[in-house]
Image: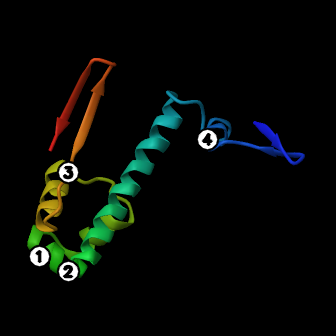
C-alpha cells in the first residue's frame, strides 16, 4: 500500500492477497486457475467473432453442439485440452503453451 494525495492506494496483488488469499494457497490457486479459464473462454469468443463465425458454425466445425461453445465462451471449465486444440484449429488460430519448471527448464508447445 502507498499513499497518493492522502489516499491509500493498493496494488492488484495486495487486493488479491487480502480478499482471495496469499499466492500459493489452495484458495488463491483455484482463483487463478478459474481466471485463466475465463481468459481462455474470452479468447475463443473474440477469435470466433473476428473470423465471422456463429457459435453454431464453430460447433459444427469442431463436432460439438452450439451450447458447448457457448459454455466455453462463458467460462472454459470442464473442457478437454483436445477440444480446445480443435477449436483453435477450426478458428485457424495458433495456441502456444509454456510450462516453466524452475528457472532453468522451460517447455513450450506450439
- Side of 22 relative to 79 (left or right): right
Instruction: Give residue 38's mark.
Output: none
**Vertical side of 5 occupied by 86: above or below:** below
Residue 16, by quadrant, is top right
The residue drawn where x is 28% and y is 17% is 104
Residue 13 percent coordinates (x, y): 60, 38
Q: Circle 1 sits in a helix, a strand or a loop, which is it?
A: helix
Q: Circle 4 sits in a helix, a strand or a loop, which is it?
A: helix
Residue 58, by quadrant, is bottom left
| Residue pointed to by mark 3 | 80
Residue 103 percent coordinates (x, y): 33, 19
| Residue pointed to by mark 4 | 16
Q: Are marks 4 and 1 in contact (CB under 8 Å)?
A: no
Q: How far apart are the alpha carbons under marks 2 and 1?
A: 6 Å
Mark sitting earlier along the chain (4/1): 4
Q: How far apart are the alpha carbons under marks 2 and 3?
A: 19 Å
| Residue pointed to by mark 2 | 56
- Side of 37 relative to 98 (left or right): right
Foreground disc of the pair 4, 2: 4
Q: Do the residues labelled 4 and 3 touch (CB within 8 Å)?
A: no
Instruction: Give residue 60's mark.
Output: 1
Q: How far apart are the alpha carbons under marks 4 and 1?
A: 39 Å
Q: How far apart are the alpha carbons under marks 4 and 2?
A: 37 Å
Q: Do the residues labelled 2 and 1 touch (CB within 8 Å)?
A: yes
Q: Furthest-right residue in view?
A: 6
Residue 8 percent coordinates (x, y): 82, 44
Residue 14 percent coordinates (x, y): 66, 37
Q: Furthest-front residue in view?
A: 5
Amino acid at each position: 500500500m502507498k499513499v497518493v494525495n492522502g489516499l491509500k492506494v493498493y496494488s492488484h496483488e495486495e487486493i488479491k492477497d487480502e480478499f482471495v488469499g496469499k499466492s500459493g494457497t489452495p484458495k488463491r490457486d483455484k482463483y487463478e486457475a478459474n481466471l485463466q479459464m475465463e481468459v481462455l473462454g474470452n479468447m475463443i469468443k473474440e477469435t470466433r467473432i473476428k473470423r465471422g463465425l456463429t457459435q453454431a458454425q464453430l460447433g459444427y466445425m469442431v463436432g460439438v453442439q452450439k451450447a458447448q461453445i457457448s459454455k466455453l465462451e462463458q467460462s472454459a471449465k470442464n473442457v478437454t485440452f483436445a477440444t480446445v486444440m480443435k477449436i483453435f484449429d477450426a478458428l485457424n488460430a495458433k495456441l502456444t503453451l509454456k510450462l516453466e519448471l524452475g528457472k532453468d527448464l522451460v517447455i513450450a508447445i506450439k
